[in-house]
Structure formats: structure tokens, C-alpha cells
Image (cartoon, coloured by chain):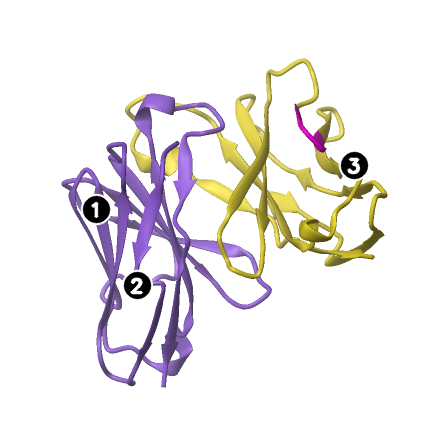
Amino acid sequence: GAVVSQHPSRVICKSGTSVKIECRSLDFQATTMFWYRQFPKKSLMLMATSNEGSKATYEQGVEKDKFLINHASLTLSTLTVTSAHPEDSSFYICSARNYRLAGGPYEQYFGPGTRLTVT
Amino acid sequence: AQKITQTQPGMFVQEKEAVTLDCTYDTSDPSYGLFWYKQPSSGEMIFLIYQGSYDQQNATEGRYSLNFQKARKSANLVISASQLGDSAMYFCAMREGYVENSGGSNYKLTFGKGTLLTVNP
């Protein structure tokens, strides 16, 4: 079946550095990908919708200069956390939309997530 | 108003018994889809079951069934014959509307706060 990968699965970085997280759809083309953030024992909060070849659409309250999203190809979207601080520590999950299965239950597939710790 | 409400922060069930996880939703869109996901401690989101707003019958997938009561706007998940491996966080989610070529925003999933299920031996 369809698979979405994320890399890295875990990352620890120092405050002030930038971290890039990759989200890849492995066997389907994803014109749309979504980036979520999840705090411990909390729900998934949508950060932004990433559309291939165009600018991402950010949810209210999400700093677009802080969380840079690039969707340069039909199988790859990246989230860069710039000048990371401890409060950016979280679990980041991407999902990819398979437009061929649009409207049904298998339209979106989730990646395994990336746990970011900023020290 | 919250679009997805899960009122049970935590639930406990004995192994081999059935358990119902509650979910209510709020939408004015006639076309929507309801999802249940399982998230174990590893963090991956595992799709369990789906109910479309126009589906006449309640969805079932193995030990999972969805009790869809459209008039009450509820979509409770029933897990039969609980297993120790069912211990996890469970999220109810909704996708509203479907408009072709409308861009990404119409395909968003909105999640509830989740219910932590613990299966006791």
C-alpha cells in the first residue's frame, strides 16, 4: 500500500540552529501534503498545507518565517524550523494526499513523525 | 465551537471486553467524512475506520465498528474483544466537504483531543 516516510525520525539540536524535516510519498504523487504538530498527550494541530509548486497555506497563528515549507516535487515536502528554540520541541507529523483516491478513506496517509528536541 | 469533541480523556477496559469511545462532531456541510485513528506510543497514526456522511450503513472493520448517528452528530468507535495491543491514544477526525480543484484547504482533517485507552489484563 501507499507509504509516507519522514526523515529524520528523531533530532536533537541546539537552540538557534535550523532543522529540516523531509516528508516523502514513496509510491504515489502527492500534490498536497500537510504538516501537523503534536505536543505530548495532545491532539494534532494542522500547521500548514503544502501544495506542489506553490506557496504553502499556513494556519492562523503559525509563523511562516519560523516554519518554512517547501514542496518542490510531487513526492517531497520539507519543513524547516528556523532558529529553533526549546518551545519548538514537539512531534511533527506530515501527511500526503493521494489525489487518485480523493474523497475516500485512503485519501491521506500519515508519515511516522519526527520528534524534535531543542536544547 | 469545537468541530470534533471527544469527552473521554481516558478509558479503561478489561481484556476481551468491548469498549466504546465517544465522538461528536459539528458541521453544516452535508458532505463530510469521519475517521478514527489509533496512535500507539511510537507516534505513528494508524487509520482504523471511515464513515462517509452519505453512507447508509455503519462502517465495520474487523473488531472495529463505528456507531454513526447522523441526527445526533455522533460517530462512536466500538472495539470488540479488546486486546492488550489496543492500548493507545485514539483520535476521531473529520474532513468536511469535497470540492474538486478547490485547493488544499478543503481536504483538511480536524482532530479531536483524543482518548487514551488502557486495556488491562
What are the residue bounds of the magenta stretch? B60-65
Foreground label between 1 and 2: 2
Position in image of residue A38 (x %, y %):
48, 61
Chain on which label 1 sits: A
SS at mark 3 in the image:
loop
Q: Callout 2: helix, strand or loop?
A: loop
Q: Nearer the viewer, residue A61 or A5?
A: A5
Please tell me in which quadrant of the rendered image residue A84 appears. bottom left
Q: Mark 2 points at which residue?
A: A8
| Disc 2 to disc 3: CB gap under 8 Å | no
Please name the residue shown 26% across and 46% down the image.
A24
Task: Judge from the rendering whether residue A63 lies leftward or rightward of residue A52; answer left or right.
Answer: right
Judging from the image, mark 3 belongs to the subunit labelled: B
Indicate whether A41 appears above or below A33. Answer: below
Q: How crowded is mark 2: few (under 14 residues within 10 Å), some or many (20 or more)?
A: some
Mark with earlier residue (1, 2): 2
Q: What residue type is labelled 1?
A: Leu
Chain identifier for the yellow-coloured part of the image: B
Alpha carbon distance from label 2 to label 3? 36 Å
The residue under label 1 is A76
Q: Which residue is drawn at 62% across and 44% down?
A: B4
Q: Mark 3 points at which residue?
A: B80
Residue A14: % across, % down: 28, 85
Q: Looking at numbered disc 3 in the image, what kind of residue is underneath it?
A: Ser
